[in-house]
Image: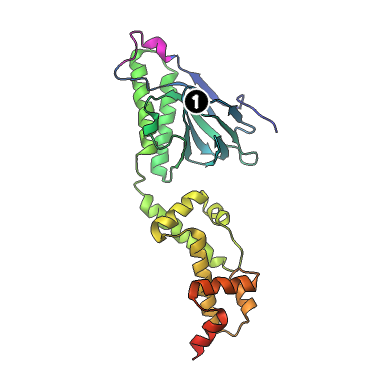
């Protein structure tokens, strides 16, 4: 596997020696919250970074496009477009671009004494709406711009506040259109399920079709239906099987295939667990 830590076409990299501009110790408007280095790596094929003992700073990763993968201790995360994740200080980790769809990524190393108060630490946050991720990306670009200007106490204070704003927007700003967006995603997911009842589709198939993560799709279904997407899909299949039993003379194995199950015995057990009756008993009950 080819591995590159940097050296990508059109990349940007900045270090900010911030302590030089706090000559009397920490400033009350900075309070040890500041970036130390940051970068933007576009289309970063073979990007790879591994630190067995971590670093002293927090590391914020924001995927602008494509896909990458992050491992923190024993946890694995897939980062797609508009996903964010923060690696806590002194935490073993590695991250790398997907080989088939390499990410474009913003990253920032920064000091943050109260990092445990931010829910992004050691977790992924998905930014859904265009309004919100456009705002976050605008502030990333602004942060780069200011860090490239004159080093001064005034700029240092502004940079500290802008970094805190970015973190707050990622962690605490709600998607104003989130409910509507989630309803749209639910409708599209259910439409896809109904159009593919005869195929053995998976959770990944559905989430890939919607271009969102499986975890986010599951969270939406659990929020609105108190069950995951696959449980909901099974319910649709059993409902369709009931319709076939009511209006057709198809055999049990034929109905099983029609609703996505090659194994007729498995289908019968699943049908009984959901309805309390075997397909044969259900057919008999509605004919009397």
- Disc 1 crowd, CA 10 A, few/some/many (<14, 14-19, 20+): some
Q: Residue at x 55, y 81 (%)?
A: 245
Residue 23 placed where, x, y %?
Answer: 36, 8
Nearer to me, 121 or 22: 121
- State which region is magenta: 18-27
Q: Residue at x 40, y 52 (%)?
A: 181
Residue 147 lies in quadrant:
top left
Q: Is residue 227 above or below residue 57?
A: below
User: Dominant secondary structure of the magenta stretch?
Assistant: loop
- The single residue placed furthest to the right in the displayed view is 1
Residue 21 placed where, x, y %?
Answer: 38, 11
- Relative to residue 158, is residue 121 drawn left or right? right
Residue denoted by label 1: 90
Is 19 within the magenta? yes
- Residue 257 in view here: no
For the N terminus, give its image quadrant.
top right
Q: Residue at x 37, y 12 (%)?
A: 152
- The single residue placed furthest to the left in the displayed view is 28
Q: Could you tell me which secondary element the residue under label 1 belongs to?
A: loop
């Amino acid at each position: 596997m080819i591995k590159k830590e940097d050296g990508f076409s059109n990349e940007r990299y900045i270090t900010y020696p911030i302590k030089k501009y706090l000559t009397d110790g920490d400033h009350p408007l900075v309070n040890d919250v500041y970036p130390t280095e940051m970068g933007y790596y576009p289309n970063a094929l073979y990007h790879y970074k591994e630190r067995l003992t971590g670093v002293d700073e927090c590391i914020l990763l924001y995927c602008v496009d494509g896909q990458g993968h992050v491992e923190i201790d024993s946890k694995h995360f897939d980062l797609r477009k508009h996903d964010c994740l923060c690696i806590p200080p002194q935490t073993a980790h590695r991250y790398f671009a997907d080989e088939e769809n390499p990410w474009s990524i913003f990253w920032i190393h920064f000091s943050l004494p109260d990092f445990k108060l931010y829910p992004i630490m050691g977790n992924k946050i998905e930014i859904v709406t265009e309004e919100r991720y456009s705002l976050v990306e605008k502030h990333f670009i602004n942060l780069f711009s200011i860090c490239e200007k004159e080093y001064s106490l005034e700029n240092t204070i502004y940079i500290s506040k802008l970094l805190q704003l970015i973190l707050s927007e990622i962690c605490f700003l709600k998607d104003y259109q989130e409910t509507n967006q989630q309803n749209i995603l639910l409708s599209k997911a259910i439409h896809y399920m109904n159009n593919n009842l005869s195929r053995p589709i998976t959770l990944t198939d559905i989430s890939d079709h919607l271009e969102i993560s499986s975890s986010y799709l599951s969270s939406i279904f659990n929020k609105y239906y108190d069950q995951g997407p696959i449980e909901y899909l099974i319910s649709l299949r059993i409902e369709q099987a009931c319709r076939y039993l009511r209006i057709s003379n198809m055999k049990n194995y034929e109905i099983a295939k029609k609703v996505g199950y090659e194994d007729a015995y498995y289908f019968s057990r699943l049908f009984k667990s959901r309805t309390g009756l075997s397909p044969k008993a259900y057919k008999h009950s509605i004919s009397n």
